[in-house]
Amino acid sequence: MTIKEIARLVEGEIVGAPADDTYDVEKAFASDLMSDVLRFSMDETVLITGLCNNQTMRTSEMADLRVVVIGRDKQPDEDMLELAQDLDITLIKSKFSIFKISGILYQAGIKPLY
Amino acid sequence: MIMHYTFEIERGNFTDAGQASSSVKRTLKHLGVAPANIKRTVVALFEAEINAIAHAYGGTIDVDIDDEKIVMVVADSGPGIPNLDLAMQEGWSTASAEVREMGYGAGMGLPNIKKNTDDLKIESTVGVGTTVTMTVFFA
């Protein structure tokens, strides 16, 4: 699934790095705990989180994530957006809860990480 | 090829947390190290960096890279780890509410470090500080 399709499904807005239309997302992992994010391989995975700060970006960088859905209508600040651009990570801002975002993407065929 | 880097750790500075790991990641990419080894290295270093920022009063990160391996020494002055066996257990954490709000403090830091390194040495003295030495071999 493309990043733009994910954004459309969760009625989200794309911010940070521009969406790479060639990137194919197969799996999702939902967590607000960044150490849990670092435990797993995040290839072709979208992170769904309500944690909206620089550490979300740094953790995504270390985990090689390319796309992050920020739920619960959290608003990334300028620093975070700048960091996302520098690190080439696309953010999708959504007003939906983490549960709703997860449900929508699961129903659309995105697989759980495990 | 032998490279050496030193980074400072500032107590509670979560804004800049991850800069050392980010810098090391860029260097290893530039050197052509295999992606799987880069990931193991930066996850371990990032967790150690976060641990020191969250728990200690300040410290340094020394990184040595040669053709075969990377050795990362995170040395802090701080409260130390009273019970290392407990600290190595998944889920055990003494992190503050503030640290948990940053997305850390799940008790996975040291277990993640152990999982991602080929050699791990932790020396800690209560009331003095902790030195974590991590080695990742590239081959």
Image (cartoon, coloured by chain):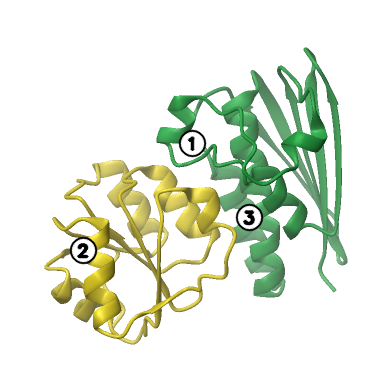
Chain colours: A yellow, B green
- Please say whether residue B99 is visible from this viewpoint: yes
Q: Residue at x 26, y 75 (%)?
A: A105
Foreground: A18 or B128? B128
Q: CA distance from mark 2 to mark 3?
A: 30 Å
Q: Report in which chain the residue with disc 2 lies.
A: A
Q: Report in which chain the residue with disc 1 lies.
A: B
Residue B92, relative to residue A3: is it above or below?
above
Residue A31, relative to residue B82: is it above or below?
below
Dot 2 alpha-carbon crowd within 10 angstroms: few under 14, some 14 to 19, many 20 or more: some
Q: Is residue A28 rendered to the left or right of residue B68? A: left
Amino acid at dot 3:
Val
Q: Report in which chain the residue with disc 3 lies.
A: B
Q: Position of residue A3 (x, y in %)?
A: 27, 77
Look at mark 2 in the image and give the residue it sits on. Answer: A100
Question: Which numbered circle lies on residue B43?
Answer: 3
Question: Which numbered circle lies on residue B16?
Answer: 1
Foreground: A97 or A1? A97
Which dot, 2 or 3, sits closer to the camera? Answer: 2
Q: CA distance from mark 1 to mark 2?
A: 32 Å
Residue B50's image quarter?
top right
Do tag 1 and tag 3 residues touch (Cβ < 8 Å)?
Answer: no
Dot 1 alpha-carbon crowd within 10 angstroms: few under 14, some 14 to 19, many 20 or more: some
